[in-house]
Amino acid sequence: MGFASAISGPSAITGEGVIWGGTMIVEEFNARGGIMGRKIEAYFADNKATPGEAVSAVRRLVDVDKVDVIIGQTHSGACLGAMPIVKELQVPMVIESCSNPKIRELSGKGGNEWTFRVNIDDEIMANTFAKSMARSAKSASMIAQNDDFGRGAAAAYDVAFKRAGVKLASTEFFDRGQADYRPLMTRIKRTAPDAVLLVMLASDASVFMRQFRELGLTQKIYARGSVATVEFL
């Protein structure tokens, strides 16, 4: 069984979780006799959260480690990059957290029948978030990663906010690992939304929140599961 995630780079915190979780579940199954009496071997590959490295990770897991199934790739861009190669190599890939709606559109009958996603995508999450935010906010700003994860989410929330009656005051994109969010926050301060939605990972959200408070901004913050880590708390 192969696991692919970001083990190095700005998104490495996600890979740590995959390694811990993958190791734990394999040990748990093997303690009970494995699957159909066969012990499971776990292999891990680094996709660095990028499409190109995701292809390399798949090839390593399949060609070198000889895995029968891949779990990953954690990040939407990496998932989209890996989908063509798993179809070419005919190895099933179970997607555990990538949320870009394109993955659903490209998977299944008539598309890529070697990819299976077990988590909900941005369109479903956006509708739920927007309805919740509409209870206490008439307007919102969104801060999102400048990649397939962030832009896929931004497109979904743009539609969902309109449907829920929440005015999207501004949408700002940033690069992962960015050190200074103050220019984005200045624009938030100028548009004065009721709430701010974060579409980012925990490491970036931690830096963002420190600077947010330092500038005296007081809007209610909404964030997705990608920040639900011990590091952020």
Image: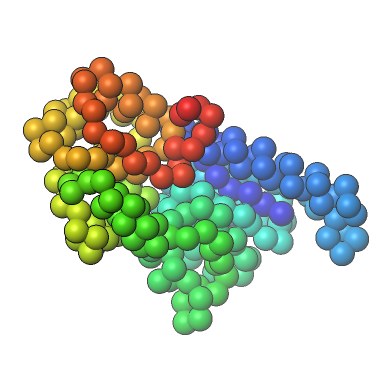
Tell me where residue 114 appears, x and y as whole percent: 57, 70
Q: Quadrant where the N terminus lies?
A: bottom right
Q: Quadrant of residue 86?
A: bottom right
Task: State the image coordinates of residue 196 (x, y, percent, origin top left).
Answer: 26, 39
Q: Is residue 18 left or right of residue 41?
A: left
Q: Is residue 170 visible?
A: yes
In the picture provided, is 51 more to the left or to the right than 60?
A: left
Q: Residue at x 65, y 39 (%)?
A: 19
Identity of the residue drawn at 9% across and 33% down:
190
| Most foreground residue, 225 or 179 | 225
- Residue 214: give x, y in percent of width and height: 25, 17
Q: Is residue 126 visible?
A: no
Colour scheme in use = rainbow
Q: Is residue 120 left or right of residue 44?
A: left
Classify 136 as above or below 85.
above
Image-based side of 95 in relation to 20, left or right:
left
Q: Nearer the viewer, residue 31 or 50?
A: 31
Residue 40 lies, with reference to residue 106, above or below; the image says above
Outermost residue to the top: 214
Query: Residue lying furthest front in this view?
Result: 135
